[in-house]
Image (cartoon, rainbow, N blue to C red):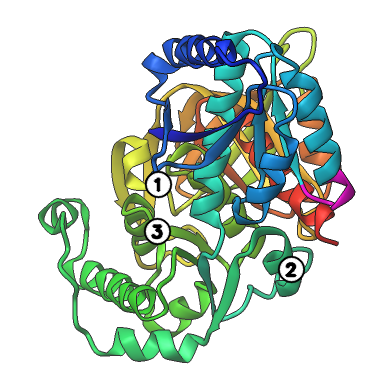
């Protein structure tokens, strides 16, 4: 992935020895970037973003001439030669005086390369999130009394458009009975216990698919229990399929969960699992592990090593997904309803369970004491979002970026 370098200099040296210094400096950074799929290039309009390499002192006026045309945030690089760093500090102060964000990179080439990789990940995530349309289909479920969000705040902080879509509009699409092209239909037919129930679940999927196309949605959250009353069927399979297709899909009209899943997708390009913390067991001297049982019926199919189609837990109707997840490290994430705080912890899947009285996919997760505390004592509602691996630094960097941007533009 290419990153455009704009070089700024103002030297009285007729031999322009600074240019050779600059060439060597950029070559060393590119050597560090080589195996990370990033490259600094000059004069490339198709690049991911721009960095400004200030090569000498006296380049400040050159910066002022181009500053208004530069995308934000502005990223400065100094090689700490030829009065480059003082010039960068002057430019940074100029931008701060105008309440403009600026990132200054200097030091060893390896450290600068690492920072460029992190900035690139944030830029990719920002482009994925900013301007996204997310559907709220049928309003949040009645029991989500602590999970309502301010649409204007979502727009201000993340530049995400929340689009209200009525349950009636979805039902109109479902009632057409027109099934979209189902990629793995033969596989689902083998898993389903009842062909009529499967057809109904796929009709829900198809109705959602048409709404996604109509409103150009990057994702949605669905007031799903209303469908159970109307169709004696569930949206669990539809949500699982759509998440696998790259569409953010959460249930019960939970907007904070939808935004949390969007951020995970933007940061990692991974699918994730919306789950309830359903049981907590504290460790003791005989069993030192704190354990949390997470469960739900909407697991994305690609996250599972093995899939079983059952009924939806609460209703005994439709299709609920029971999946077996890989043991190992996971990230547990959830934005608060006011978007000002978040739960972001690591856990370890120890076991897949098949207990009665819980939703169909059940994972037993080990949590350390410092991670169990915020899960219990901070206000994040009844769902969390789970992804494979340790994604905490990527998520935190993106959250901090959007928080800083919102603060700058108050």
Read off the magenta span.
Answer: 96-100
**Residue 99 forms part of the magenta stretch:** yes
Q: Nearer the viewer, mark 3 or mark 1?
A: 1
Helix, strand or loop under label 1: loop
Residue 375's tag is none
Above/below status of 292 relative to 406: above
Question: Circle 2: is it few (<14), some (14-19), or many (20+) Cα within 10 Å?
Answer: some
Cα distance between the residues tagged 3 and 1? 30 Å
Number of numbered markers = 3
Is residue 404 rendered to the left or right of residue 15? right
**Which percent across, then down, holds residue 358?**
55, 48
Q: Mark 2 highlights which residue?
A: 149
Nearer-the-camera pick, 60 or 407:
60
Helix, strand or loop under label 3: loop
Question: Which residue is situated farthest in the left direction here?
Answer: 186
Question: Which residue is situated farthest in the right direction here?
Answer: 97
Residue 45's tag is 1
């Amino acid at each position: 992935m290419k990153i455009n370098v704009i070089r700024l200099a103002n030297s009285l040296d007729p031999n322009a020895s600074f240019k050779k210094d600059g060439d060597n400096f950029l070559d060393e950074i590119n050597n560090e970037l080589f195996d990370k799929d990033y490259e600094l290039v000059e004069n490339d309009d198709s690049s991911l973003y721009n960095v400004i390499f200030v090569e000498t002192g006296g380049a400040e006026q050159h910066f002022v001439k181009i500053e208004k045309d530069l995308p934000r945030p502005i990223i400065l690089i100094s090689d700490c030669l030829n009065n480059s760093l003082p010039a960068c500090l002057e430019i940074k102060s100029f931008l701060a005086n105008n309440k403009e964000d600026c990132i200054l990179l200097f030091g060893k080439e390896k450290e600068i390369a690492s920072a460029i990789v992190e900035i690139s990940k944030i830029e990719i995530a920002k482009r994925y999130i900013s301007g996204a349309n997310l559907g709220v289909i049928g309003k949040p479920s009645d029991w989500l009394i602590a999970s309502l969000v301010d649409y204007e705040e979502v727009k201000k902080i993340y530049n995400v458009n929340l689009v209200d879509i009525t349950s009636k509009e979805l039902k109109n699409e479902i009632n057409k009975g027109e099934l979209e092209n189902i990629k793995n239909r033969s596989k689902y037919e083998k898993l389903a216990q009842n062909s009529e129930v499967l057809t109904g679940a796929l009709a829900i999927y198809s109705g959602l698919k048409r709404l996604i196309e109509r409103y150009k949605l990057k994702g949605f959250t669905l007031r799903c229990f209303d469908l159970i009353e109307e169709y004696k069927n569930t949206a669990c399979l539809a949500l699982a399929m759509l998440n696998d297709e790259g569409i953010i899909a959460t249930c019960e009209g939970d907007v904070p969960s939808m935004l949390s899943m969007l951020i995970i997708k933007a940061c990692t390009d991974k699918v994730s699992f919306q789950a309830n913390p359903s049981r907590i067991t504290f460790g003791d001297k005989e069993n030192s592990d704190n354990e949390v049982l997470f469960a739900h019926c909407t697991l994305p199919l690609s996250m599972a090593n093995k899939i079983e189609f059952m009924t939806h837990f609460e209703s005994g109707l439709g299709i609920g997904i029971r999946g077996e997840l890989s043991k190992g490290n996971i990230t547990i994430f959830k934005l608060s309803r006011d978007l000002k705080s978040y739960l972001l912890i690591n856990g370890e899947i120890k076991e897949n369970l098949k207990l009665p009285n819980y939703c169909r996919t059940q994972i037993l997760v080990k949590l350390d004491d410092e991670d169990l505390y915020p899960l219990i004592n901070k206000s994040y509602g009844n769902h969390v979002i789970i992804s494979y691996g340790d994604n905490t630094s990527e998520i935190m960097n993106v959250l901090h970026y959007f928080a800083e941007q919102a603060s700058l533009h108050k």
